Amino acid sequence: MNVQSVDCRDQDAGPRFVSSLRETGFAIVKSAPIPWEVLDRIYVDWLEFFLSDAKYEFECDPSTPEGTQRGYVPMEVSETAVGEELRDLKEFFHFRPDGDAPRELVEDLETYRKSAFDFGQMLMGWVKQNTPRASTTRLPDAIETFVSPQQSLLRVLHYPPIDAPSGAVRAAAHEDINLLTLLPASQQRGLEVQTIRGDWVAVSIEPQDMVVNTGDMLQEATDRFFPSTTHRVVNPPDGENVSRISIPYFLAPSPDKVLSSRYTAGTYLAERIDEINR
């Protein structure tokens, strides 16, 4: 699987990025305009948060219409990947611009969210500019009118040290729902991508790399021109059984945006969340 590593500063960065997404659903981006020092603080501060009881003050209410789309989600009610019986071994916090979060942690989280959104807009521009027009008819020329900061979701994930039931993994094989996922290099290994042949390949990245992958909404909006590739987070090897913090940002459109003759972004999201929460 040829996941390309692309430097943002290179003149051919856009075409190479899109080529990698087209072939594999993934790309590794270097020199991303992200405040990496802020991310370093987020890793430290949010690990403390997850190890404290303060997280329960922000626990989500699954009975509400938006359910687990805002706030803290404990491991006991964490996601179950479609087709799986066991829940993922993770807890997480969902943050949007209008969401609630620990006051002392909001500033760094919002700083990173804004920069990630701007970066995501740039990547979506590359997608629009370097994809055959026939495959992007549902993506407007002014791509910023398609992507929504309110609907795009920042998730802070904590994979605790493993005490795993047989067959359980940190995050079972799945595809993302959104347009693009931006994932800064984690401090621990574990991310794997599935090839066309069904083999699993570890994603090898360096500090300050950004992993970007196609989500199902972009696959739907481009009539499968961009594949939404299956990936997972496996349990740590012996000697590395420690907490893992991961901070994906899910770039998403407004609910009313049309993805295809079958779906708007809103109806697609509702269907997928229902599948995950069954």
Image (tube, rainbow, N blue to C red):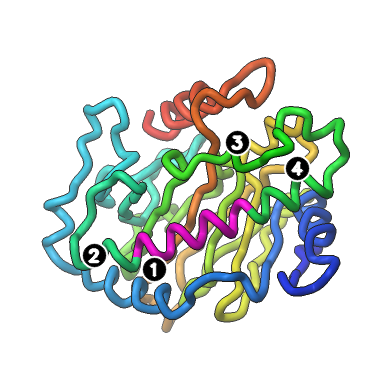
Q: Residue at x 83, y 61 (%)?
A: 16
Identify which residue, 31 or 24, lies in the foreground: 31
Residue 245's mark? 1
Amino acid bearing label 2: Phe
Across and down, in percent, residue 61 comes to 20, 36
Task: Say left or right for 125 vs 154.
Answer: right
Estimate the spatial distance between the alpha carbons at disc 1 and disc 2, rounded to whole Å: 10 Å
Mark number, residue 50: 2
Res 90 seen here: yes
Q: Amino acid at mark 1?
A: Ile
Categorize mark 3 by other alpha carbons within 10 Å: few (<14), some (14-19), many (20+). some
Is residue 237 visible in the rendered structure shown here?
no
Circle nearer the N terminus (2, 3): 2
Query: Within the image, what quadrant is residue 66 found in?
Result: top left
- Mark 4 or mark 2, earlier in chain: 2
Q: Secondary structure at mark 4?
A: loop
Q: Quadrant of the N terminus?
A: bottom right
Closer to the camera, 86 or 113?
113
Which element type, helix, strand or loop, lies under badge 3? loop
Residue identified by numbered label 3: 146
Asked if 224 appears above or below 46 in the picture, the reply is: above
The label on residue 226 is 4
Compare marks 3 and 4 and give the one earlier in the sequence. 3
Q: Is residue 10 left or right of residue 108?
A: right
- What is the crowding at mark 2: few (fewer than 14 residues within 10 Å), some, or many (at least 20)? many
Q: Position of residue 238 (x, y in %)?
A: 44, 79
Q: Are marks 4 and 1 in contact (CB under 8 Å)?
A: no
Q: Find out whether the residues at labels 3 and 4 contact each other: C-beta distance under 8 Å.
A: no
Q: Residues within 10 Å of mark 4 (few under 14, many from 20)?
A: many
- Whether tag 1 and tag 3 are in contact, CB under 8 A, the answer is no
* N-term-proximal mark, 1 vs 2: 2
